[in-house]
Image (cartoon, coloured by chain):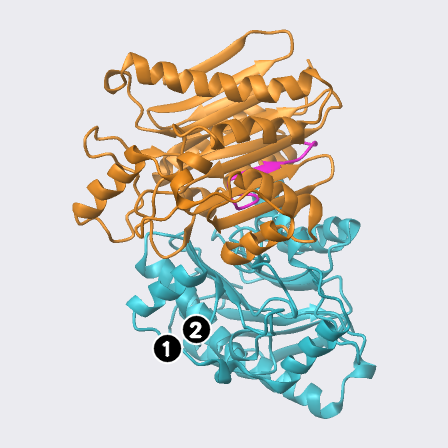
Chain colours: A orange, B cyan
Amino acid sequence: MNKHCIVIHGGAGTIQRNSMSPELEKQYRQGLTDALVAGNAVLEGGGTSVDAIEAAIVTFEDNTLYNAGRGSVFTHEGKNEMDASIMCAKTGMAGAVAGVSHIKNPIKLARAVMDKSEHVMLCGKGAEEFAKSLNFDFEPDAYFFVQQRYDQLMQIRDSGKTQMDHTAADPKEGQKKFGTVGAVALDRYGNLAAATSTGGMTNKRFGRVGDTPIIGAGTYANNKTCGVSCTGHGEFFIRSVVAYDVSCLMEYKNFTLKQACEEVVNKKLLRLGGEGGLIALDAQGHAEMVFNSEGMYRGMKRAGEEFVLGIYRD
Amino acid sequence: MNKHCIVIHGGAGTIQRNSMSPELEKQYRQGLTDALVAGNAVLEGGGTSVDAIEAAIVTFEDNTLYNAGRGSVFTHEGKNEMDASIMCAKTGMAGAVAGVSHIKNPIKLARAVMDKSEHVMLCGKGAEEFAKSLNFDFEPDAYFFVQQRYDQLMQIRDSGKTQMDHTAADPKEGQKKFGTVGAVALDRYGNLAAATSTGGMTNKRFGRVGDTPIIGAGTYANNKTCGVSCTGHGEFFIRSVVAYDVSCLMEYKNFTLKQACEEVVNKKLLRLGGEGGLIALDAQGHAEMVFNSEGMYRGMKRAGEEFVLGIYRD
């Protein structure tokens, strides 16, 4: 069954069919398809899982509909602060950036940390200096300005919910979304890789960092077990070390990928009230897209099979 | 055996008896004793494990000999950027700060993130703003200026090793030290807690963050298994999710604390070339102080027993 495969997510949360217009749903599905097409093209062409997930996530980061890169939500100060991470199971190496601004594609910077530095995690201005030293693409504030995102901030900020508000709630729609994008791939060489990118939470303050840039929490990949990318209420995912927990249940308790994902998302996280989900692939090519929220933007493309897309629970 | 107990470390690395003066060794041992006395006093008085480890770490942070708080090493830019984290097994809550400057006691700020925010991790200037909102103690650059630390930076910076240099090498002594301090305690109520604090690596650049502020990597605590605080080459500890790995080996594979620590430090990390060590306590009060480097500043105090101190391998 070890055929190349890519699985992606575009965030989880209160995503309900009755509050989604057909036009908006079409745009979301197109975004998922674009990511799968980009990642699958790399895998079809004999590329590596690391290249495939980077290509997939770049399409999300360039799409204003998803909360990562260009479409990142605004912090309390009206800025965009982004996090991203990537891990390569073949080498066991990883890279991550937290709280970076003006970087067009944070996932490329996370990859550069993995490939071109001795470090795993770089933060804030320091990470931006590293990017400058590598002649990275920087974009002005205007590039990241999306009217809808700014309106979301104004609605929350004006409502007085300025205290460490962790929700990305859109009061108009009563929705709580954990906007994050992620990808996990298995290449024809049998190597897994996983990556995650986010613009964080609307109205976030105090340099809050969620699970996205944390190896073991939001992202993890190991050829003995699986690759995992998470989306959800980050604080719960950090405390539960979610991505590595899935891997440990497989390695130490001989759970299948499906059993491990169910245990972590629908038992352990649910008991704690930790809303969200994850995507995962094992080295045999089994895929899981599991969530305990009402919906998760998700998709999968396996060699020789049809595209699979999903948004709602059923 | 469930008596209250505190175990501490003050960093691991190339710590050799023949390069240590009797006077310096005495100072290091006094620092370890001070930390144990502070933490033990809390436990003796019926305090919680969280209060005990905070008290112990504050003594390290106020001691210029240890690389945390006041004695933090200098970054490439001649600044002090500190990281800290804490986790309470009773509540499962955690707090962490990364890349903070001018905070007298970063461990207190990590605890405030745990107790007084909805978040787990705050970074850089944002974390400092959070501290200001709580009227935290700030200190000027002069407070953190330690001539020996500055000399260490000058020696490395002048040597041209400015590229992402991850060692805290003192060229004079040929030493490589992973300066970090940590504490794990079990209180009379049977609750574990773990905490870690560091000034990072001399000459570090680009906002590098190691394992210290990462829950699951540098710090973890769970009453079902153990509390863990790590010190070592942080990048390896992040990629190996070291602290949570010890816990998972106990929970999922029924390893004893000793077996789990040996497996992680002396097998898995050693195979990867990841130098360092950790301290750990389980809920029954078993303690481990394990390292694969030449030495680790360490100590333990159990109710009704003598103080135990150690520096070298034997």
Q: Amino acid at mark 2?
A: Ile
The subunit letter for the residue under badge 2 reads: B
Judge whether A171 appears above or below B71 on screen: above
Q: Position of residue B133 (x, y in %)?
A: 29, 67
Q: Position of residue A186 (x, y in %)?
A: 66, 24
Q: Residue A217 colored magenta? A: yes
Structural crowding at the residue carrying mark 1, measured as other residues with C-alpha within 10 Å and reported as few (<14), some (14–19) or many (≥20): some
Instruction: Say left or right for B212 vs B167.
Output: left
Q: Secondary structure at mark 1?
A: loop
The answer, for residue A192, to whether it is visible in the render is yes
B265 or A285, nearer to the observer: A285
Q: Amino acid at mark 1?
A: Asp
Give the magenta part as a residue range: A213-224
- Residue in the picture at 64% in, 17% down: A41
The residue that disc 2 covers is B103
Q: Position of residue A45 (x, y in %)?
A: 71, 17
Q: Position of residue A159 (x, y in %)?
A: 16, 45
Q: Determine the residue located farthest toward the right in the rendered image.
A: B18
Structural crowding at the residue carrying mark 2, measured as other residues with C-alpha within 10 Å and reported as few (<14), some (14–19) or many (≥20): many
Q: Which mark is residue B137?
A: 1
- Residue in the picture at 73% in, 34% down: A90
The answer, for residue B250, to whether it is visible in the render is no
Instruction: Say left or right for A221 vs B263.
Output: left
For the C terminus of chain A, the image quarter is top left
